[in-house]
Image (tube, helix red, strand yellow):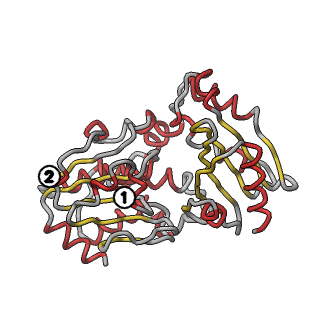
């Protein structure tokens, strides 16, 4: 399939690049690396994201070129959908983007439904950034310093700085090649992990007050409410990484972050250790993702939602 994707890229002239809502480092780094590659190949390319770029990722090369309003999709002959298991994950413009004649999906989620004919899918890959690295190597494309910086950022954020089970020998080889091509690990890590705003720290303090350990201290969770955001002046993007905190507690096997998005509407981020498959939990409630990192949405009061999640984990 990768050869067919390369052929389509060579034939295409006008590309739209997009990724999922609630952007993370893998989605953004992958988009920006692909954008820079296409530009170097002499193609026209535009990155569209529904959501604004989170503060911590605005340092990435070419991030200032991302647009947030989409019109006239007829001008694009190829749509590149990155880090999305389903086309609806791109947000409100999904039906509009679906009209583009040729769609290419590059993704590593186990829950991917194969929504496009042209695709590069590998649920065992650490990140979409790693898949793009493979693609560029296959194309014999020389990765510039800026492209390498974006791909390195994509890989480190989706591997938890090479801590997650999806990290393989191939992941390290890719990272090493990117560093050889100019990616600066210290500078990238400082921008991603050591650049928090006071509002984020205040929000984290609020979230830690809700820390609870359930199911014989095997499930750890925190809650972030809309009131917490108002009180601290934080934004939803500042919750990135919060879900990993309960997982650091000894004995915890599953970590859950409940973020309130409406009166009775919560987004759940789930992480796990060892062999616990949280993708099965998320799927039960209409979500999906990876074995050790998934998400879903649920309606109801927080106590009822937590009870349902704990029961679903218990059944595993």
Badge 2 density bin: few <14, some 14–19, many ≥20, Cα 10 Å:
some
The circle on residue 105 is none
The reply to whether callout 2 and callout 1 are in contact (CB within 8 Å) is no
The C terminus sits in image quarter? bottom right
Occupied quadrant, residue 207: top right
Identify the residue position indicated by label 2 in the image. Answer: 44
Question: In this figure, what is the number of numbered marks?
Answer: 2
Occupied quadrant, residue 122: bottom left
The residue closer to the viewer here, 3 or 93, is 93
Mark 2 vs mark 1, CA separation in Å: 17 Å
**At which x and y percent is residue 256?**
68, 49
Residue located farthest toward the right when viewing the structure as drawn: 216
Badge 1 density bin: few <14, some 14–19, many ≥20, Cα 10 Å:
many
**At which x and y percent is residue 248?**
72, 48
**At which x and y percent is residue 92?**
37, 47
Report whether residue 183 is seen: yes
**At which x and y percent is residue 41?**
15, 58
Horizontal side, residue 5 vs residue 232: left or right:
left
Q: Residue at x 31, y 41 (%)?
A: 61
Q: Residue at x 44, y 33 (%)?
A: 55
Quick one: SS at disc 1? strand
Occupied quadrant, residue 270: bottom right
Horizontal side, residue 96 vs residue 227: left or right:
left
Report whether residue 176 is seen: no
Counting residues from the start of the chain, the first of labels 2 and 1 encountered is 2
Quick one: SS at disc 2? strand
The N terminus sits in image quarter? bottom left
Horizontal side, residue 61 vs residue 276: left or right:
left
In the picture shown, does residue 242 fall above or below 114? Answer: above
Identify the residue position indicated by label 1 in the image. Answer: 82
């Amino acid at each position: 399939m990768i050869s067919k994707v390369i052929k389509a890229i060579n034939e295409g002239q006008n590309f739209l690049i997009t990724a999922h809502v609630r952007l993370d480092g893998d989605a953004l780094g992958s988009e920006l690396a692909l954008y820079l590659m296409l530009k170097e190949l002499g193609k026209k390319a535009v990155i569209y994201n529904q959501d604004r770029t989170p503060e911590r990722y605005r340092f990435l090369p070419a991030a200032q070129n991302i647009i947030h309003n989409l019109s006239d999709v007829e001008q694009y002959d190829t749509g590149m959908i990155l880090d999305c298991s389903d086309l609806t994950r791109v947000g409100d413009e999904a039906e509009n983007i679906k009209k583009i004649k040729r769609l290419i999906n590059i993704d590593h989620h186990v829950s991917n439904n194969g929504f496009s004919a042209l695709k590069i899918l590998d649920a065992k890959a650490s990140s979409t950034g790693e898949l793009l690295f493979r693609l560029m190597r296959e194309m014999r494309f020389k990765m510039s310093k800026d492209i390498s910086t974006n791909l390195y950022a994509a890989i480190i954020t989706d591997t938890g700085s090479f801590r997650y089970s999806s990290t393989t020998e191939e992941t390290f080889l890719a990272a090493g090649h990117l560093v050889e091509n100019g990616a600066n690990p210290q500078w990238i890590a400082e921008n991603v992990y050591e650049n928090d705003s006071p509002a984020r720290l205040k929000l984290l303090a609020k979230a830690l007050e809700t820390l609870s350990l359930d199911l014989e201290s095997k499930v750890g969770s925190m809650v972030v409410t809309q009131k917490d955001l108002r009180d601290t002046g934080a934004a939803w993007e500042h919750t990135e990484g919060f879900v990993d905190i309960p997982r650091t507690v000894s004995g915890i096997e599953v970590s859950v972050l409940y973020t309130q998005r409406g009166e009775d509407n919560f987004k759940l981020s789930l992480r796990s250790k060892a062999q616990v498959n949280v993708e099965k939990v998320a799927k039960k409630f209409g979500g999906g993702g990876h074995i050790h990192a998934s998400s879903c949405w649920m309606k109801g009061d927080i106590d009822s939602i937590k009870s349902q999640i704990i029961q679903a984990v218990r059944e595993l």
